[in-house]
Amino acid sequence: MTSSPTRLGCHLGALRCSMSISTALDRIADSGRLDAVIEPVRKTVNKVLRPGAVKDVLHGVWLGHPLHPALAQVPLGAWMSAGLLDALPGNRKEADLLIATGIAAAVPTALAGAADWSEGEIGQQRVGAVHAVLNSAALVLYAGSLFARARGSRARGRRLAYAALGLASSSAGIGGHLAYHQAAGASHAATAARTLSHDWIDLGPLADLPDGQPMLRVSDDSDRPASLCVIRRGDMAHVLVDSCSHLGGPLHQGRLTDIGGNQCLVCPWHGGTFVLADGRAVRGPAVAAATVLQTRVSDGRLQAKVPERHEV
């Protein structure tokens, strides 16, 4: 069955709309017009949310996954449900409760988002600033909606709530662009690991590596060169994909430290910290693990292999 010209035109129009939205957000990411506002806000966020236990909780280090997108489901879900109840008769108290729940949940959601935003690269911060402004405007409108409802003006309260829902939904779309298009919150280590050969990679004589010092080793044993961070510890070695899970920082330029009896590697860019033994993140802004390769020593030569979970 073939599509009618009208239906085909609608599809093409939707595609052009989608492309134009993406293009507009890319232009925002490339433009420095917002930087004069972004930089002082970023400094303020980092001053209030200093690196440490609280910020690590907001990043989601304990969860192994960014906390902000998980929290964001609560206010948006509550507000969408309130919008549905507002369209039906006899649900006044339930709709009001859902709006209030969304407002309350928006506070920790915003804090988690601010923690991530302050550690993002500049393009992510520019688009994230638009995301935050829309969310803030939606929050103000929802607060106005509750106030109008409390004063008995339910029609005005519903109008404000639907306007707020439109802003919050648009902002959620921008959040999706940040995650899927700009890779905010994605594991750059896992992405880099998928480019590696799945054969054993020869990294040269173990004895040639300095003890206790991160080193870069690039293998061209296959058509997919491997950039790896190698740390020798006596007669053994740890080998990691040379890419921090946060923003892809060069781990071989990092420093070693000890946390809770675990030998760890600190990324030089934003301080994400990983346990050498298994790669798990113990300090943010990194939340996903670094990719640790399997190792063996054969005839005095160090060899490494990408873990099975990264095979395509």
Image (spheres, rainbow, N blue to C red):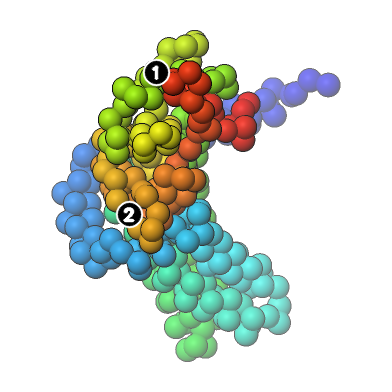
Write the residue at 29% across / 38% down: 212
Rendered view: 19 above or below 67: above
Residue 228 seen: yes
Write the residue at 44% across / 83% down: 147
What is the crowding at mark 1: few (fewer than 14 residues within 10 Å), some, or many (at least 20)? some
SS for dot 1? strand
What is the crowding at mark 2: few (fewer than 14 residues within 10 Å), some, or many (at least 20)? few
Q: Which residue is mark 1?
A: 204
Image quadrant occupied by the N terminus: top right
Which numbered tag is attached to residue 124?
A: none
Which numbered tag is attached to residue 258?
A: 2
Write the residue at 48% across / 80% down: 146
- At which x and y percent is residue 98? 58, 76
Rendered view: 186 above or below 168: above
The amino acid sitting under disc 2 is Asp
Q: Nearer the viewer, residue 152 or 48?
A: 48
Write the residue at 35% across / 58% down: 259
Q: Which comes sooner in the sequence, label 1 or label 2?
A: 1
Q: Is residue 24 left or right of residue 4?
A: left
Query: Disc 1 and disc 2: Cα gap in Å?
Result: 27 Å
Q: Count how many numbered circles sit on residues in the image.
A: 2
- At which x and y percent is residue 283? 37, 56
The amino acid sitting under disc 1 is Gly
Q: Nearer the viewer, residue 118 or 123?
A: 118
